[in-house]
């Protein structure tokens, strides 16, 4: 293997390491909780607290996305996933909201996992850039969430 600068492995970024540490804390915390109802209630509180910590534009979008997902995918359970608001079905993540600030990107992202039933043909989008949640965007998110859990 040549030792050119472009192929030098520099490891995980500080943001990636922080996300992994958050995920480890989430796993430990979930293991300590009591009943299933207690776990669900605390997980939702954790998601709402994480959203409340976000910067203005991310927080405003995350609040709307959270409301849309819980309204259109009532079977989805809110939980933190690598420090991001996520929504699971039977314990498996279906979708998540990644704030722009988390990885210092220019837009927030609504992402869907392979558990989401968005399959169409041989290729389909699984992540969507969000810069603003307009009525049109709300309608699209609602439709995607309904399809993802159908």
Image (cartoon, grey):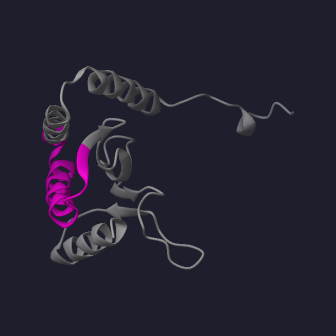
Q: Is residue 107 visible?
A: no
Query: Residue 136 lies in what quarter of the image?
Result: bottom left
Residue 13 horizontal side relative to residue 5, left or right: left
Q: Is residue 93 magenta?
A: no
Residue placed at 40% from the left, 58% from the top? 112
Q: Quadrant of the N terminus?
A: top right
Locate residue 99, reporting x and y percent.
29, 47
Residue 116 horizontal side relative to residue 30, left or right: right
Q: Is residue 61 magenta?
A: yes
Residue 52 horizontal side relative to residue 147, left or right: left
In this rendering, the count of numbered labels is 0
Locate residue 139, reporting x and y percent.
21, 76
Q: Which residues are magenta?
A: 51-78
Query: In the rendered image of this protein, does residue 3 appear above or below residue 136?
Result: above
- Name the foreground residue: 120 vs 60: 120
Locate residue 2, reporting x and y percent.
86, 33
Residue placed at 33% from the left, 23% from the top? 25
Locate residue 97, reporting x and y percent.
30, 51
- Name the foreground residue: 87 vs 34: 34
Query: In the rendered image of this protein, does residue 122 appear above or below residue 133?
Result: below
Query: Residue 138 lies in what quarter of the image?
Result: bottom left
Which residue occupies the extreme right position in the image?
1
- Name the foreground residue: 48 vs 72: 72
Query: In the rendered image of this protein, does residue 73 appear above or below residue 14?
Result: below
């Amino acid at each position: 293997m040549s030792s050119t600068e472009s192929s030098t492995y520099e490891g995980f970024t500080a943001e990636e390491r922080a996300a992994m540490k958050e995920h480890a804390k989430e796993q430990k915390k979930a293991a300590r909780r009591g009943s299933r109802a207690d776990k669900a209630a605390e997980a939702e509180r954790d998601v709402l607290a994480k959203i409340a910590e976000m910067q203005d534009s991310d927080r405003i979008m995350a609040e709307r996305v959270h409301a849309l997902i819980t309204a259109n995918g009532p079977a989805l359970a809110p939980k933190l996933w690598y420090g991001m608001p996520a929504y699971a079905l039977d314990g498996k993540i279906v979708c998540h909201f990644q704030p722009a600030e988390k990885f210092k990107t220019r837009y927030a992202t609504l992402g869907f996992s392979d558990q989401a039933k968005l399959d169409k043909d041989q290729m389909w989008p699984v992540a969507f850039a969000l810069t603003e949640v307009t009525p049109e965007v709300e309608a699209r998110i609602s439709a995607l969430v309904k399809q993802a859990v159908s």
